[in-house]
Image (cartoon, rainbow, N blue to C red):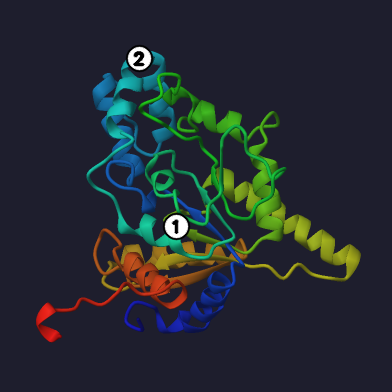
């Protein structure tokens, strides 16, 4: 697996593997582990805009979604059900691997049902979905849909209830929501690995900065620091333009300022299938490899 991991991340790889092996970390999954069209936030917003007859604004995807909902909520809901069917013929194998691994808990900003579809027979024994996001029943062996869970077969499930547009984000991360407190506790006390998600986005970044402040305050007042860490699996900067390289460096610097440790990997292709290979290897190490094929003629 050495060709998949950046040489600068070899030590970090061992740290993360030890945490995964011993159920010592929470996996935080974003749209990068979902499947098209939800795998690309910008293109998804454009698709909704086109369907609803709204002009999409670059860099203002959340506002575009709000415009779609306001113009024609029923049409927006129909498109949502069409894009996020409960059963889908295409799915990233990452979901299958991650659900087998020994994480303490699984947290996702995705609202598609595909990860939840794999929970039967897994270590996950309880699922929670926004707005009912809390730790009152514990964290271990739980799956948390922090931006909502969409079930296309449920007639009482509506896209407007998902954390998707600007209005819903403000509401979800506002004072009348359990979500900020849940995340603040998570980022303060737990080992976390971000995958397919950029934690420097405005709402999550704010919570992380607050958790860093709390961690520092606890250390000053008690003399004992919190030793848990946060990691992010992020692509290496090979084969990219000078402009992209500078943006990559700025992003890595931002992660460091947020006290998030980059775990650099080779994406292999534009679809980042390198992640799948890493997860599959982890399953082989920590869970068990599939049975070898055998020919009847070898008897």
Residue drawn 61% across the image and 61% down it: 258
Q: Which residue is mark 1?
A: 99
Residue at 47 percent across and 62 percent down: it is 251
**Label 2 near label 1: C-beta < 8 Å?**
no
Dot 1 or dot 2: first in sequence order is 2
> Where the C terminus falls, by quadrant?
bottom left
Q: Residue at x 22, y 44 (%)?
A: 89
Name the residue located 44 percent from the left edge and 23 percent from the top edge.
Answer: 157
Q: Residues within 10 Å of mark 1 (few under 14, many from 20)?
A: many
Horizontally, residue 96 falls left or right of residue 203, namely left
Give the percent coordinates (x, y) of residue 91: 28, 50
- Position of residue 180 relative to residue 263, above or below, is above
Disc 1 to disc 2, C-alpha distance: 34 Å
- What secondary structure is found at the residue carrying circle 2? helix
Nearest to the observer: residue 272 or residue 165: 272
Return the x and y of residue 298 as percentages of the image width and height: 13, 85
Whether 17 is drawn above or below 251: the answer is below
The residue to which callout 2 is attached is 74
Q: Secondary structure at mark 1?
A: helix
Q: Position of residue 131 (x, y in %)?
A: 60, 32
Using the image, determine if residue 106 lies above or below residue 191. Answer: above
């Amino acid at each position: 697996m050495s060709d998949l991991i950046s040489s600068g991340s070899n030590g970090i790889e061992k740290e993360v593997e030890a945490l995964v092996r011993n159920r010592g970390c929470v996996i935080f999954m974003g749209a990068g582990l979902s499947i098209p069209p939800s795998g690309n936030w910008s293109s998804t917003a454009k698709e909704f805009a086109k369907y609803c007859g709204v002009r999409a604004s670059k860099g203002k995807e959340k506002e575009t979604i709000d415009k779609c909902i306001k113009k024609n909520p029923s049409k927006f809901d129909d498109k949502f059900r069409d894009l996020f069917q409960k059963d889908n013929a295409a799915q990233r194998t990452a979901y299958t691997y991650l659900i087998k691994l020994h994480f303490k808990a699984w947290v996702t900003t995705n609202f598609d049902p595909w990860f939840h579809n794999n929970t039967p027979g897994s270590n996950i024994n309880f699922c929670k979905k926004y707005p009912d996001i809390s730790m009152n029943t514990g964290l271990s062996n739980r799956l948390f849909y922090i931006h909502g869970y969409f079930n296309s077969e449920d007639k009482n499930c509506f896209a407007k209830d998902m954390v998707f547009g600007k209005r819903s984000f403000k509401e979800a991360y506002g004072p009348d929501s359990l979500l900020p407190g849940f995340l603040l506790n998570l980022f303060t006390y737990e080992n976390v690995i971000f995958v397919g998600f950029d934690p420097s986005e405005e709402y999550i970044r704010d919570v992380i900065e607050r958790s860093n402040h709390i961690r520092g305050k606890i250390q000053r007042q008690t003399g004992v620091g919190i030793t848990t860490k946060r990691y992010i699996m992020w692509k290496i900067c090979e084969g990219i333009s000078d402009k992209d390289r500078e943006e990559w460096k700025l992003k890595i610097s931002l992660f460091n300022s947020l006290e998030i440790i980059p775990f650099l990997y080779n994406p292999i292709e534009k679809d980042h299938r390198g992640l799948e290979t890493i997860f599959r290897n982890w399953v082989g190490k920590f869970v068990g490899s599939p049975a070898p094929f055998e020919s009847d003629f070898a008897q």
